[in-house]
Image (cartoon, rainbow, N blue to C red):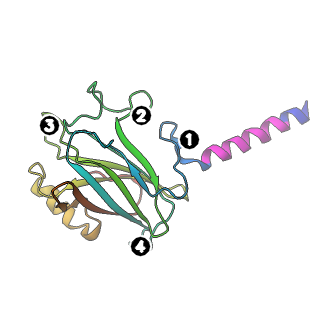
Amino acid sequence: MIRRRKFITTLGRTVGAVITAIPFCRAGQWPDEPSANNSSRRIAPENEPGNKLAIAGRVFEADGRTPAASVIVYAYHTDASGLYRPDHYVPDWQNRRPRLEGTLKTAGDGSFQFLTIRPAPYPHRTNPAHVHFVLWWPDGHRQGDTLWFEGDPLITSEMQTRNAARAEFAHIRSVKKTESAQYVESRFRKHDGGDDTW
């Protein structure tokens, strides 16, 4: 009886340790962890309506200089109609996941790239168009961040002021346009955690 109890206790601790080591299991609602060398990911399929968009990013440690390798980056956004899902539900990730989402892991220099379409603002709302990010560091640190697009008429002067204080890690980013696609660069730095989306 004592041996069986000890075995069950040990097994429970082992399983608990394994679950704690896997970020997506800890949340219980996120996509599968990407492969070790997958720092590029397509979110929107090739035939998705909307303007094609490439998001090239880099992730840094708290000092803002040291590249953060092997950080899991999860991104999601609305479609060209401003909806996360055709049924108009806001995602809850367990039962109604966002339709346009993707997960990858940063390269050795902290770089990553998502290929997708430019999202639209929510219908009948005043929120600017944006992309949500959730980042997990190998040490278990987790944080939320956002990407906004420079020139969006829904960006307020208050948002511009708060953005300016972030300097190179600003959420509002300039967009380069070609005849066939748009391109934006984003930079994230490890911070105190929580959802840094204003």
Specify few, some or many for label 4: CA neighbours under 10 Å numbering under 14, 14-19, or 20 or more: few
Q: Is residue 36 left or right of residue 97?
A: right
Checking the image for residue 63, the label placed there is 4
**Which residue is tagged 2?**
93
SS class of the residue under badge 3?
Answer: loop
| Residue furthest to the top | 87
Q: Is residue 140 above or below residue 123?
A: below
Please identify the quadrant where the N terminus is shown.
top right
Q: Main secondary structure of the magenta part?
A: helix
Residue 39 picture location, percent across and down: 45, 58
Specify few, some or many for label 2: CA neighbours under 10 Å numbering under 14, 14-19, or 20 or more: few
The answer to which quarter of the image holds residue 7 is: top right
Q: Which residues are magenta?
A: 6-20
Q: Is residue 177 magenta?
A: no
Amino acid at dot 2: Trp
Considering only order in the chain, which callout, 4 or 3, is on the residue closer to the N terminus?
A: 4
**Which residue is tagged 1?**
25
Q: Is residue 29 left or right of residue 161?
A: right
Q: Is residue 63 above or below residue 178?
A: below
Specify few, some or many for label 3: CA neighbours under 10 Å numbering under 14, 14-19, or 20 or more: few
